Structures are given as C-alpha cells and as structure tokens.
C-alpha cells in the first residue's frame, strides 16, 4: 500500500545528497518528459534535463551540506479531474547558504528553505510536479526585507504536533479530506465585517479551538481563529474582496492528513493595499498549496505555501531585485 509514496521519499533526498558524478543515475526518479511547474522566477520546465539544470543543480550549489528534512510526506489517489497517484510534501531544504539562489544573495549561514511539493508518480517516476519554495522567507533568513513583515509571526515551519506526518500508517485519509473539503466549501462566503464563515468555528465548527495556521513568508503564522483572521484573513480580504478560490488540480488524503493545491487556485482583483503595495486594480492569480492535520472531526493544523514572488511580480514589485538592492546597501 502506497509503495510509490514510501519509495519516492528516499529517492528525492538522494537527488541532493549523492555525489555529483552519480546524479545522472539518481535523476532517473524523474521521467524524461516530466512537466515541472516551479514558483517564480523559475516557473514551467519541460523535461528532466531542464529540471536538473535549473532546480536540482542550483539548490546543490547554493546550499552547502544540502539535504531534505520532511515534515509531511503523504500520498493518495487524486480525486480531482487529472486523477492519478500523487505525493504531497512539506519539507525544508537545509544547508549553509553560500552561493546565490535564483538571484537571491547568500548570507553564508544556515538556512531552512521551506517547500511545498506535489508529485504525480507513474511507474515509480515523477511525471508531473508542482513546487513552491518560499523565497520570501529565504530572504528574511538571509537578513533581507524586500517587503514589510507586518502580519503574523515569521518562524520556522514546525512539524505536526503529533509527529506522524511522514508516511503516516494510521488514520482515515478519506475522512480527513472530507473535513477539509467541507471547510473549503463553506469558506467562500464570508461576513464582510467579521470575516467569519459558516461552520468554521464554535459548536460543530471545522477548525479546532486551538488551531495553528502556519503561513508563508510575508504573512507569518498565527494561533486560533482570531489570530488567523487578524494576521491573514482580514488583510487578504480587504485587499482582494472578490477573490475566488478552490480551483484545485489535486486533492489527496492520507491518514490524519489532507493536501490540496491549485496552479493557480485563486483569481482576484487588487482592490486594497497589501504587504506595503498600494491597490493597483489589476486582475491577479495566486498559486496555492495547503496541507492539513485533522482530528476525527476538525482541522488542528494547516501549513500554507503561496507563490508570493509571482503574486508581487503581478502587482509590479520585483522582490528579488529589491533583495539585491538591500544587500548592496548593507
């Protein structure tokens, strides 16, 4: 059961830890004709050679001692239209940041580079991938501040409180996904004054009272529904009041966990100030990944990856150029 999930995890780590002379053999876990969608500034890659050249090698060269530390690693049958067997992961790429990565200048110190990953697996190889690496948070760790950090707590993503997120062996994935889908269905409609939505909190609510919401760089993390509203939901909905979400290519459940992703998931208009950027009136899209830990009836923890480099580019802000300018003036 889920052998493809269990086999893929060590194979992914080998891509980054094997001697460079052995990388050609290690990269066989990626299908030759793979379609690999990355966060900005990399974006879409086609074919294994492009992935090795533009993803694997830049990471290997930038982070000395590079290896993965998985916090969540789950698999399941995708219930959305593409179907297939998929793996979802929340991981950190760990090493000493000694060389530039996709234009971001290094700080020669330890970094935990967080990532959200979705892989379609066929015959033991990755045929399709969606990957968001939190470059905003990397800049923060490198001592740069290309956007104002004014919302939640900027912190390392913790693993699940139950310490069972890597290839879970117990729990009901279908039930976990049902809980998440019920929450998502109710979340679309909200009170414009309180930003509340039906069935989210209180008696019979789908979020646990002591919920944790772990957000990406630029948003940060928060605690309980009130913290989530204050640090993320209210600022986001004030900036993008017409947002429409849930356009997901993948939804999977595995044990107490579920994961969903859209590429893009959201469409919206930039109608109010956000992250220090005045309203532009532009139509925007947002790439999204959500990973959830569920109890029998509620969501206890939520890890969120958003491609904010891409979003800010659409808003007219080049955060990587801003990071380089900041480093040049230090």
Image: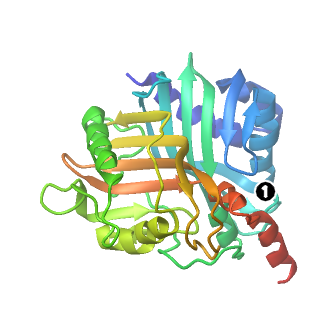
Q: Is residue 285 left or right of residue 200?
A: right
Residue under the point 80% across and 41% down? 54
- The residue singled out by tag 1 in the image is 101
Quadrant housing residue 178: top left
Residue 162 lies, in percent from the top left, at 31, 53
Q: Is residue 253 left or right of residue 27?
A: left
Q: Is residue 244 left or right of residue 33?
A: left
Viewer-nearest residue: 115 or 194: 194
Q: Residues within 10 Å of mark 1 (few under 14, many from 20)?
A: some
Residue under the point 78% across and 71% down? 322
Quadrant assignment for the C terminus: bottom right
**In the rendered view, would you say 76 is above or below 302?**
above
**In the rendered view, would you say 67 is above or below 231?**
above
Q: Is residue 162 left or right of residue 199?
A: right
Residue 38 lies, in percent from the top left, at 68, 43
Quadrant assignment for the N terminus: top left
């Amino acid at each position: 059961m889920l052998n493809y999930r269990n086999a893929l995890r060590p194979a992914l780590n080998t891509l980054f830890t094997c001697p460079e002379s052995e990388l050609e053999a290690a990269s066989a876990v990626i299908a030759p004709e793979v379609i690999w969608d990355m966060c900005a500034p990399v974006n879409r890659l086609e074919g294994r050679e492009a992935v090795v050249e533009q993803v694997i090698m830049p990471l290997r060269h930038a982070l000395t001692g590079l290896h993965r530390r998985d916090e969540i690693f789950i698999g399941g049958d995708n219930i959305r239209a593409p179907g297939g067997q998929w793996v979802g992961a929340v991981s950190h790429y760990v090493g000493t940041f000694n060389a530039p990565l996709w234009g971001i200048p290094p700080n020669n110190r330890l970094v935990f580079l967080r990532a959200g990953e979705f892989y379609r697996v066929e015959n033991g190889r990755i045929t399709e991938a969606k990957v968001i690496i939190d470059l905003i948070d990397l800049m923060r760790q490198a001592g740069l501040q290309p956007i104002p950090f004014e919302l939640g707590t900027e912190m390392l993503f913790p693993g699940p409180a139950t310490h069972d997120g890597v290839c879970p062996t117990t729990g009901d994935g279908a039930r976990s996904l049902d809980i998440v889908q019920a929450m998502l269905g109710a979340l679309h409609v909200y009170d414009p004054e309180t930003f509340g939505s039906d069935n989210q909190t209180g008696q019979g609510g789908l979020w646990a009272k002591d919920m944790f919401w772990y957000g990406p760089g630029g948003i940060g993390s928060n605690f309980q529904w009130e913290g989530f509203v204050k640090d993320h939901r209210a600022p986001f909905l004030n900036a993008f009041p017409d947002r429409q979400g849930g356009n997901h290519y993948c939804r999977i459940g595995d044990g107490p966990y579920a994961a969903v992703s859209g590429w893009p998931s959201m469409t919206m208009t930039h109608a109010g100030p956000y992250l220090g950027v005045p309203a532009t009136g532009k139509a925007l899209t947002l790439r999204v990944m959500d990973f959830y830990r569920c109890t029998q009836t509620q969501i206890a923890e939520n890890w969120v990856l958003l491609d904010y480099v891409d979003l800010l580019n659409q808003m007219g802000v080049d955060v990587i150029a801003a990071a380089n300018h900041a480093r040049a003036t230090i």
